[in-house]
Image (spheres, helix red, strand yellow):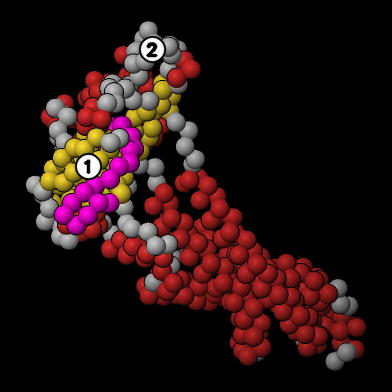
Amino acid sequence: MGQFSEYIKMALYNIKENKGRSFLTMLGIIIGISSVITIISIGSGLKADVLSTTETKSVTVTVDEEETTNTELITWEDMEALRTQLGSKTAGVVSSSMSTGSVTTRKGSYEAYLTLTTPDAENDPNQEKMVRGTYFTEDDVLNAQPVCVLDKASALYLFGTTDVVGLDFDVNIENTIQTVTVRGVRDADADTMKANEEAMNMFGMEMPVYLELPYTVSEGWGENPDNFSAVDIYLSEGENENAVAKSAVQILTSRHLNDGDNLFTKQQAVDMTGMMSTLLDTVTAFIAFVAGISLLVGGIGVMNIMLVSVTERTREIGIRRALGAKSSSIVMQFLFESAIISGLGGVIGIIFGAGIAGLVSALEIGGLSAKLSVTAIILTTCFSCGVGIIFGIYPARKAAKMSPMEALRRM
């Protein structure tokens, strides 16, 4: 241990004696480490932000129509059973279909997109929350009440105000006119509203309106609303998608024992979370690799300065060898010096990198956030020290191979 402390003291003394040269040698390491830390931190922050928006919030169970000859698919009673038996695992059980029509108010007639759905659609994680009134109820579904929920943008478009709860208007679907009463209004993102309006104006088109109605209202234009080919199950926070889907399939299978084998299956959606995670990891790793090239440049700088140091300290090496110093002792002396130079550069680089990442996150530059990675800090620290050792081996071995006579002759 005493010998190692002596090597460290000698290395620090030589670095101190050549402050300017030592700092310039460290500069390549500092730039490389700070670049890698900054990039990995921003990449980790971006990954966390993206994954939080692509997190799976629902699962869909579908009917394999090739496995059954029964026209009864998923019923309202099946959905009630799912809601009851899944309990706290689900925030809602929903089945929806789409239709188009037109809406007529005092302001005129407008194209309409209709979502025929069930009451739990109020909890759709991809939709805005209610800001006025209430969502329609199970009684509205069972009694096929012609009520609707519309978003704030549609309310403003149709009536010029969002205070529309209780107002009536006509909906024309399949050449059948029904009078519908507004039960509630959803919020709408202002930026999205503006962007949609600008896009429609650009193409000379009028804005459509969006309505959500009880699915049983479709009886009014001659459709049979009793059968569903798929059901969406909104997951409660922290619930596992596959576990909930498996439970749902078991519940439905037990209620349709005579309708066919493997009748119900989980719909295999594209794993956006996994794809985005892999893509971001790959991009971050590639950019970090490119930035890490500067570490190799810094390592070459360490090797060059150590070769200069060997030349300048020929007399010292000769005297030490003449006094009986072993080759291994000379090697260790120069290796310690190169490792400490790289290590100090690495520490400074980590501080700079963490500072830059923190600044980017605090100021939200470009909307980016940063998340420091302890693993990245440890790896870059080890790598920076490794660079010093690897690129210090050649100068160290060159110094160790000097014969005392040759070294003293060059004095």
Left/right of residue 269 with respect to residue 120 in the rendered view:
right
Residue marked by disc 1: 171
What secondary structure is the stretch in magenta mostly built from? strand
Q: Is residue 98 above or below residue 250?
A: below
Tell me the crowding category of disc 2: few under 14, some 14 to 19, or many 20 or more residues within 10 angstroms, Cα based. Answer: few
Question: Which residue shows up at 34% across the image and 16% down it?
Answer: 72
Q: Nearer the viewer, residue 170 or 84?
A: 170
| Label located before the other in sequence (2 or 1) | 2
Left/right of residue 163 with respect to residue 48 in the rendered view:
left
Left/right of residue 186 with respect to residue 250 in the rendered view:
left
CA distance separating discs 2 and 1: 33 Å
Residue 211 in the image: state x and y as whole percent.
25, 45
From where the camera sits, is residue 330 visible? no
Residue marked by disc 2: 70
- Depth-wise, is mark 2 or mark 1 nearer the camera? 1
Residue 59 in the image: state x and y as whole percent.
38, 34
Q: Which mark is residue 394?
A: none
Q: Is residue 178 above or below residue 210?
A: above
Amino acid on which the number 1 mark rests in the picture: Val
Magenta stretch bounds: 90-110
Tell me the crowding category of disc 1: few under 14, some 14 to 19, or many 20 or more residues within 10 angstroms, Cα based. Answer: many
Q: Quadrant of the C terminus?
A: bottom right
